[in-house]
Image (cartoon, helix red, strand yellow):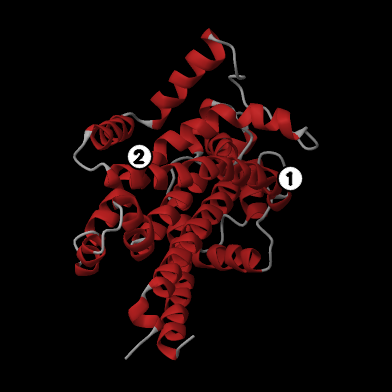
């Protein structure tokens, strides 16, 4: 690996750390300017001024904002995400199982969406401007026109209520048999797949079509290669970089954009956990979940950038 590539990768990683630090500031500031009183929401409307003052002192709410931020950031760097105000439970312990549930759901959706999107993109290019291309592109455009909650409710109505094939509530628990877990996540995974499939397919198609305009593609055609071999052997390998970028961005969305889907299917993941504690105004939980979502999103974007750098032949073989 050459020095320019190592330098670019180091720059991307350093930029990711800086960006995550900036996001942590935004998350902290955003939670601090929320309306309402944390102490009041914990003790209720019947709380006395003395009890409210004591709780504010106990939670450190009387300290300057920058001290509270530094205390929170220091805890995060040492693995201490704090304690939930409403339940008194350790946030890191509560999040661990839910994070695994969210990652499992995202993995199931990605395992279906990524290969299917690439295959449909290849078919659309192979039969471009034909009936298959128009059908695939039309279905993709239609699916992107529907919001994810609408897709989720449609799946619940048909597959859970009307046909009763899959459960409408995705209940999972530790030690659950794999077959039962797959049945439970079938509908939310399908909803997430439909949400990201169209975008990945259209971007794959666009990337390959852009490569198809190159001179070496015309040379391959003059050699008598079949259209599908030209796409598979020459066009697609050179379109990997933008395709990887699109895939990684959609994988990031599968992890951080599951909030609506998890709420619809009452799935015990990070999104459901976040919504429950936003309603309770549990600030430490909101901060911790928001920071984890940001870290996952930034990390996957860095991976996409690094993959694009490594896939660039001009950087791998500089003159």
How far across and down, in percent of the image, does residue 39 sit? 59, 42
Disc 1: CA contacts within 10 A as few (<14), some (14-19) or many (>=20): few
Q: Nearer the viewer, residue 90 or 43?
A: 90
* Circle on res. 277: none
Q: Is residue 267 above or below residue 50?
A: above
Residue designated by label 1:
89
Helix, strand or loop status at disc 2: helix
- Identify the residue at image location x=58%, y=66%: 73
Disc 2: CA contacts within 10 A as few (<14), some (14-19) or many (>=20): many
- Identify the residue at image location x=47%, y=42%: 113
Residue 163 picture quarter? top right
For residue 247, side relative to residue 216 (left or right)? right
Say whether residue 242 is visible: yes
Helix, strand or loop status at disc 1: loop
Say whether residue 257 is visible: no
* Circle on res. 198: 2
- Identify the residue at image location x=77%, y=37%: 174
How far across and down, in percent of the image, does residue 300 sit? 48, 60
Q: Nearer the viewer, residue 161 or 313?
A: 313
The mark nearer the N terminus, 1 or 2, is 1
How far across and down, in percent of the image, does residue 103 sit? 60, 47
């Amino acid at each position: 690996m050459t020095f320019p590539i190592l330098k670019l990768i180091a720059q991307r990683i350093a930029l990711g750390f800086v960006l995550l630090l900036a996001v942590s500031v935004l998350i902290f500031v955003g939670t601090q300017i929320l309306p309402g009183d944390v102490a009041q929401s914990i003790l209720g409307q019947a709380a006395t001024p003395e009890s409210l003052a004591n709780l504010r002192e106990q939670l450190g709410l009387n300290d300057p904002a920058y001290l509270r931020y530094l205390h929170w950031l220091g805890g995060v760097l040492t693995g201490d995400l704090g304690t939930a105000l409403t339940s008194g439970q350790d946030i890191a312990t509560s999040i661990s199982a839910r994070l695994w549930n969210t990652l499992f759901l995202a993995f199931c959706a990605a395992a279906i969406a990524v290969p299917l999107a690439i295959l449909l993109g290849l078919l659309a290019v192979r039969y471009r401007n034909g009936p298959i291309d128009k059908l695939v592109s039309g279905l993709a455009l239609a699916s992107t026109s529907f919001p994810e909650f609408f897709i989720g409710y449609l799946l619940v109505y048909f597959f859970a209520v009307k046909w009763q094939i899959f459960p409408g509530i995705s209940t999972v628990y530790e030690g659950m048999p794999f077959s039962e877990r797959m049945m439970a996540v079938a509908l939310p995974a399908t909803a997430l797949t439909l949400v990201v499939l169209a975008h990945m397919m259209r971007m794959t198609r666009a990337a390959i079509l852009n490569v198809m305009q190159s001179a070496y593609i015309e040379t391959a055609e003059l050699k008598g290669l079949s259209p599908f071999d030209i796409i598979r052997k020459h066009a697609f390998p050179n379109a990997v970089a933008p395709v990887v970028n699109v895939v990684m961005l959609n994988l990031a969305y599968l992890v951080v954009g599951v909030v609506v889907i998890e709420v619809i299917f009452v799935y015990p993941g990070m999104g459901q956990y976040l919504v429950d504690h936003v309603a309770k105004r549990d600030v430490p939980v909101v901060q911790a979940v928001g920071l984890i979502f940001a870290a996952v999103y930034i990390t996957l974007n860095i991976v996409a950038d690094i993959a694009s750098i490594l896939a660039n032949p001009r950087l791998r073989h500089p003159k």
